[in-house]
Image (spheres, rainbow, N blue to C red):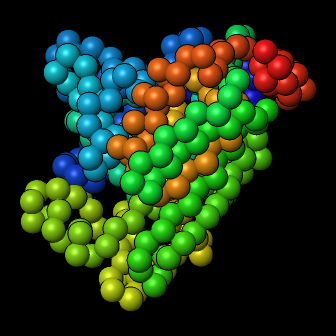
């Protein structure tokens, strides 16, 4: 885990299509100063302000996570946000010339490669962390997100689908393990063929194809190359969670346990988390040893 803030060493860019818009979009990542956080800028709109990637800027979660401010929106931010969270990038400016982040191959792999090609720049300021004093939990209609106090940042996720190729899958990922690139970043988004056809009929998922999503029919996967991991579906859910929970604006020292959640429920959890101010503190942490000490102190209060 990183205890110092960091950004990218130089600007990098890419282009692709939006999953829902089907439109081509150019995306540029730029370094940003200490305490800037992640912000999105719509370079195609005159005078449009930057939108900070924070949960209180979320305006829609029905199909993807969408943030907005003063009439402009940026859609489908979750995979790029997961990349920043997974690689411990605190400060960056994201410039795009349309309203939807390109879907690339449906995972965070291409964004991760971009950030790695830019390189990392450590900044002379400590990172701020949420440190939990007690668990925070949201349970509704069989869905659950709970965060437990811990001295590292870990996500455990379970999904259940009544489909022979998925059923129940569970995966735990410890952000300290430094395995984001190999374990999580390449897991692609997925959808069922009947849902994809339905969305396309109504003008959604216009950019969706077998190039950027795993598509599942009644009893088979339509992508010729098959899966990238045997449990790619739950790994992708961890990717989505990493992106969504990063909208708290700073990393959590805690263990998030997520059961059958999605973007809307993740967002509802963030609102509950933020409103339950007696359950956490925000502090800087100097080292893994300090994280352990601060966590123990929080629980003792
Ligand atoms: Zn996703």
Residue drawn at (65%, 15%), measured in percent from left and top? Answer: 282
Q: Position of residue 266 (x, y in %)?
A: 44, 41
Q: Quadrant of residue 1?
A: top right
- Describe residue 300's horizontal placement relative to residue 4 as left or right: right
Is residue 284 shown to the viewer in this render?
yes
Is residue 181 shown to the viewer in this render?
no
Q: Is residue 91 above or below residue 151?
A: above
Q: Position of residue 122 (x, y in %)?
A: 70, 21
Q: Quadrant of residue 216?
A: bottom left
Seen as rendered, the residue at the extreme left is 202
Q: Quadrant of the C terminus?
A: top right
- Describe residue 180's horizontal placement relative to residue 17 as left or right: right
Residue drawn at (70%, 13%), measured in percent from left and top? Answer: 283
Q: Is residue 169 above or below residue 77?
A: below
- Describe residue 282's horizontal placement relative to residue 103 as left or right: right
How many badges with numbers are in the image? Answer: 0
Q: Is residue 26 above or below residue 207?
A: above
Q: Closest to the observer: 56 or 127? A: 56
Q: Position of residue 5 (x, y in %)?
A: 67, 19
- Describe residue 15's horizontal placement relative to residue 273 as left or right: left
Q: Position of residue 258 (x, y in %)?
A: 55, 50
Seen as rendered, the residue at the extreme bottom is 219
Residue drawn at (90%, 26%), measured in percent from left and top? Answer: 289
Q: Is residue 60 above or below residue 20?
A: above
Residue drawn at (58%, 23%), measured in percent from left and top? Answer: 250
Q: Closest to the observer: 296 or 49? A: 296
């Amino acid at each position: 885990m990183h205890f110092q803030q960091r950004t990218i060493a130089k600007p990098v860019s890419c282009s692709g299509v939006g999953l829902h818009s089907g439109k081509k979009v150019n995306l540029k990542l730029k370094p940003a100063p200490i305490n800037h956080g992640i912000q999105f800028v719509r370079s195609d709109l005159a005078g449009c302000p930057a939108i900070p990637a924070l949960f209180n800027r979320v305006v829609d979660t029905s199909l993807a996570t969408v943030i907005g401010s003063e009439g402009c929106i940026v859609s489908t931010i979750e995979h790029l946000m997961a990349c920043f969270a997974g690689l411990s990038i605190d400060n960056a400016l994201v410039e795009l010339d349309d309203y939807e982040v390109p879907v690339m191959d449906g995972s965070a792999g291409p964004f991760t490669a971009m950030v790695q090609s830019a390189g990392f720049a450590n900044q002379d300021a400590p990172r701020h962390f949420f440190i939990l004093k007690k668990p925070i939990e949201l349970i509704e209609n069989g869905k659950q997100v709970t965060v437990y106090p811990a001295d590292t940042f870990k996500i455990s996720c379970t999904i259940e689908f009544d489909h022979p190729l998925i059923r129940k899958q569970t995966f735990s990922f410890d952000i300290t393990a430094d395995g984001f690139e190999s374990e999580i970043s390449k897991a692609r988004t997925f959808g069922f063929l009947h849902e994809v056809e339905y969305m396309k009929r109504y003008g959604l998922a216009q950019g969706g194809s077998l190039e950027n999503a795993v598509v599942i029919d009644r009893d088979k996967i339509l992508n010729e190359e098959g899966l990238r991991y045997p449990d790619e579906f739950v790994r992708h859910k961890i990717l989505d969670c990493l992106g969504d929970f990063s909208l708290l604006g700073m990393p959590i020292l805690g263990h998030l346990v997520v059961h059958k959640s999605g973007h809307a429920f993740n967002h509802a959890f963030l609102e509950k988390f933020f409103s339950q101010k007696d359950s956490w503190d925000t502090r800087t942490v100097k080292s893994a040893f300090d994280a352990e000490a601060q966590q123990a102190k929080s629980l003792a209060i």
